[in-house]
Image (tube, grey):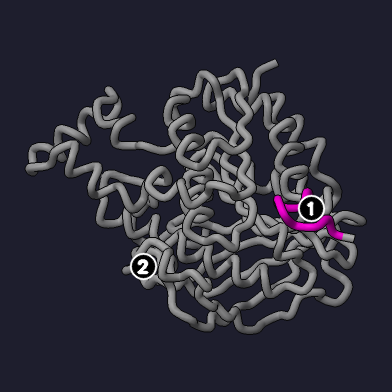
Amino acid sequence: MTCFLRYFLCLAACCGPLVRAQDAQRLPAEGQIRFEPSSRESEVPSAYRMQAADFPFKAKRLHGVEGAYTVYGLQFPSPVKSAFPENNTVHARYYLPEGKGPFAATVVLDILAGSETIPRLMCDHLARGGVAALHVQMPYYGPRKPKNAKVKMLSSNLLVTLPAIRQAVLDLRVANAWLRSCPEVDASRLGISGTSLGSLVSALTGAVEERYRKVVILLGGGGFVDAYYSHPQAREMVKSFEANGGTKEMAAYLFAPYDPITWAARLAGRDVLIMAGKQDEVILPEMTVKLWEKAGKPEIVWFDCTHLGAVRFLPDALNRISKHMVKPCPGEPPMK
């Protein structure tokens, strides 16, 4: 049985029967997200600082799994206005467990492929375990993808990629404010979780926004220029970059504000969980170790797998994420 077949069997086992939205909507259909800067906003890296602002949101009940959770669609304007109108509205799905709460909650971010399969599985698992989960679409993914332009969040076009990474972080700071405003959410157990590309964004955002009390990094790391500049698959990109006067030192300078390792020390002492593959050929193990060290050596779990092979350990990873989100943060009293 291949790892992919195991994965899809796991997916089928986790998903329950959908029911139509028949009863009254538990969330307000619209309102304002009030973003207030952190009390230590001056310490936030300058590229990611925000001022107080209001963001109108709309929420719509979509469907539910009987006895488990209800899914809502959420939309709000991005704090960043890109050149593409579709990209300037943030789209998310909120998996709200049955019951009154207060619930631990987490943002969930997708992988590079952006199929939404993994975040849907994660959200299903978390919501069944009593954790509210908000899957946020990153820039240029899903409905945010421009209809008449081939634009990706990650590409060799740094004029798009670097601003898109910044936009993702600012979008997720607003998502944090929305979750904290939800009466059913326990803000002391509010986290952010991501896999692969999503883990890089979760590590970066968690370091920037300290009101994400818990951070999960699944198949992530840092130090991209050192790891990839001499990589065979990057040869053509590096050749083009150097043909225009670029150097490795220049690349390191340009990428530094967008590399999780630059700000990882801000994660020290926080409730962080890192899970990685011992044989990962995409996010190299040494990249994970560097991020782990910079983040203060938090809890780390190593799976004996490659990047794609990590799918075999997904059920274990999901259980670990759920337990990580539910437990109180260090120094916080248990919820009664």
- Which quarter shows the C terminus? bottom right
Which-is-in-front pick, marks 1 and 2?
1
User: What residue is rendered at 60% in x and 66% in y?
Assistant: 176
Q: Amino acid at mark 1?
A: Ala
Q: Is residue 67 above or below residue 287?
A: below
Q: Which residue is mark 1?
A: 127
Q: Closer to the N terminus: mark 1 or mark 2?
A: 2
Left/right of residue 284 with respect to residue 255 in the rendered view: right
> Start and end of the magenta stretch?
327-335
Q: Seen from this angle, which residue lies furthest top?
A: 1
Where is residue 140, by image quadrant? bottom left
Location of residue 213 in the rendering, given as x and y in whole percent from the top left corner: 63, 56
- Which quarter shows the N terminus? top right
Secondary structure category for the residue under label 2: loop
Q: Secondary structure of the magenta portion, mostly?
A: loop
Front-most of residues 116 and 53:
53
Q: Seen from this angle, which residue lies furthest front?
A: 331
Where is residue 275, by image quadrant? top right
State yes or no: residue 334 in magenta. Answer: yes
Q: Is residue 241 above or below residue 185?
A: above
User: What residue is rendered at 78% in x and 37% in y?
Assistant: 12
Q: Residues within 10 Å of mark 1 (few under 14, many from 20)?
A: many
Q: Is residue 24 above or below residue 87?
A: below
Location of residue 247 in the rendering, given as x and y in whole percent from the top left corner: 14, 38
Where is residue 149, by image quadrant? bottom left
Left/right of residue 21 with respect to residue 175 in the rendered view: right
Q: Which residue is mark 2?
A: 84
Q: Amino acid at mark 2?
A: Phe
Location of residue 58 in the rendering, given as x and y in whole percent from the top left corner: 63, 77
